[in-house]
Image (cartoon, rainbow, N blue to C red):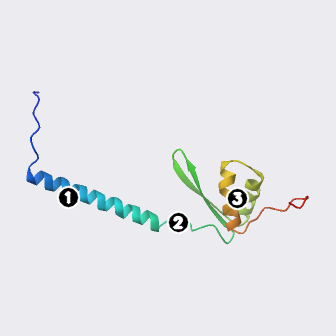
């Protein structure tokens, strides 16, 4: 196939490209606004339920625990000192699950 020199855009093509760009911008703005106002299925941690967004290489995942399961999980995370534990501990406090006092009173 021989090389074909590019020709200038016609008025119709410029209008179509501008319309496609406008629709794309409006769609992205709408998606961003929706994402900011609808955080997900779970609300913030509280009332004995713990919700943590755990970042990972594939994006992130929500970890949700309530009741006895949340208390058991929080006890384990209070005893740990890794990245996940540092994310979970403040959420446990928001849920009303505090670390158990130690024998030394700390």
Q: Nearer the viewer, residue 58 or 6?
A: 6
Residue visible at 66% across and 51% down in the picture: 84
Horizontal side, residue 84 vs residue 39: left or right: right
Of the two numbered discs 2 and 3 in the rendering, the one whose residue sits closer to the viewer = 3
- Horizontal and vertical percent position of residue 31: 38, 61
For the residue carrying disc 2, how many other residues have a C-alpha within 10 Å: few (<14), some (14-19), or many (20+)?
few
Q: Say if mark 2 contacts mark 3, CB within 8 Å.
A: no
- Horizontal and vertical percent position of residue 27: 32, 60
The earlier-in-sequence mark between 1 and 2 is: 1
For the residue carrying disc 3, how many other residues have a C-alpha within 10 Å: few (<14), some (14-19), or many (20+)?
many
Q: Which residue is mark 1?
A: 19
Horizontal side, residue 98 vs residue 39: left or right: right
Provide the secondary structure element on which disc 1 rests.
Answer: helix
Q: Quadrant of the C terminus?
A: bottom right
Quadrant position of residue 99: bottom right
Mark seen at residue 41: 2
Q: Marks 3/1: CA distance?
A: 49 Å
Q: Residue furthest bottom?
A: 47
Q: Which residue is mark 3?
A: 89
Q: Does 77 appear above or below 58?
A: below
The earlier-in-sequence mark between 2 and 3 is: 2
Provide the secondary structure element on which disc 3 rests.
Answer: helix
Residue visible at 73% across and 64% down in the picture: 68
Q: Marks 1/2: CA distance?
A: 34 Å
Horizontal side, residue 6 vs residue 103: left or right: left
- Horizontal and vertical percent position of residue 16: 16, 55
The earlier-in-sequence mark between 3 and 1 is: 1
């Amino acid at each position: 196939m021989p090389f074909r020199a590019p020709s200038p855009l016609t008025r119709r093509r410029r209008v179509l490209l501008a319309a496609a760009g406008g629709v794309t911008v409006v769609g992205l703005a709408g998606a961003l606004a929706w994402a900011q106002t609808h955080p997900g299925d779970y609300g913030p941690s509280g009332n004995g339920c713990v919700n943590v967004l755990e970042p990972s290489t594939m994006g992130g995942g929500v970890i949700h625990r309530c009741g006895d399961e949340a208390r058991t999980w929080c006890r384990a995370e209070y005893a740990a000192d890794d990245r996940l534990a540092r994310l979970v501990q403040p959420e446990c406090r928001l849920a009303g699950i505090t670390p158990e006092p130690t024998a030394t009173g700390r």
